[in-house]
Image (spheres, rainbow, N blue to C red):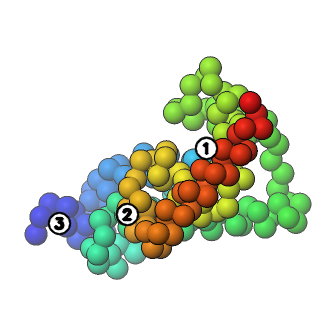
Amino acid sequence: MDAANLLIAKAAEGNSMACSAIYYQHKDKIFNTILYLVHNIEDAEDVLQETFAEVFKSLSNFQGKSSLQTWIYRIAVNKTIEFIRKKKAKKRWGLLSFSDVEIEDDISMHPGTRLDKREEAAQLYKAINKLKENQRIAFTFFFIEDFSQKEIAEIMDISLSNVESLVHRAKQFLKKELAKFE
């Protein structure tokens, strides 16, 4: 058994050191992806916790058909979609209200966003946030996280041609949206 599979087996048995190793190996990339999708640091931290709680709860079911990273991303995407849907439902009923300023502040705090580009980044994130859910996820994985379309298809559990279509439509929409700001 190779080292990666041994680590997974130990974590599935509940070994806390193995669980910590998996968590620290993947948490930063997963967090950044979630943050790009939810645009709020506290929300991203909550979704990250839910993601890894599910990872460790379900690790004994991991079959190795994809890489561990791809499997964790799939869980993260599902948890993020679940979170976004709950948040939208709450907004519809008037229980939550976020101002544009609050969203912009969270975006500008993201370590990948330079301070001198704060306004442009806010416009980009607002435009990305207007994308349909699957388009936003595919766009984020392809252009921001630099995944291949094949990896995105595995993570999202959709066909490669569907990923290509989602990315293309996202690009077209964003070109049109961002042209309004020029």
Distance in Å between CA atoms under marks 3 and 1: 33 Å
Q: Residue at x 35, y 72 (%)?
A: 59
x then y, percent, for residue 67: 29, 65
Q: Which residue is mark 1?
A: 41
Distance in Å between CA atoms under marks 1 and 2: 29 Å
- Mark drawn on residue 140: none
Q: Residues within 10 Å of mark 2 (few under 14, many from 20)?
A: some
Q: Which residue is mark 2?
A: 150
Instruction: Judge whether residue 93 can be spotted in this image.
Output: yes
Q: Name the kind of residue labelled 3 in the image.
A: Leu
**In the rendered picture of this protein, how many numbered marks are placed on residues?**
3
Which residue is the extreme one toward the right? Answer: 94
Q: Residue at x 56, y 62 (%)?
A: 166
SS of the residue under disc 3 = helix
| In this rendering, position of residue 89 left or right of residue 147 | right
Look at the image and tell me in which quarter the C terminus lies: top right
x then y, percent, for residue 103: 73, 41
Quadrant of residue 178 within the rendered picture: top right
Q: Residue at x 51, y 69 (%)?
A: 162
x then y, percent, for residue 107: 64, 37
Q: Name the kind of residue labelled 1 in the image.
A: Ile
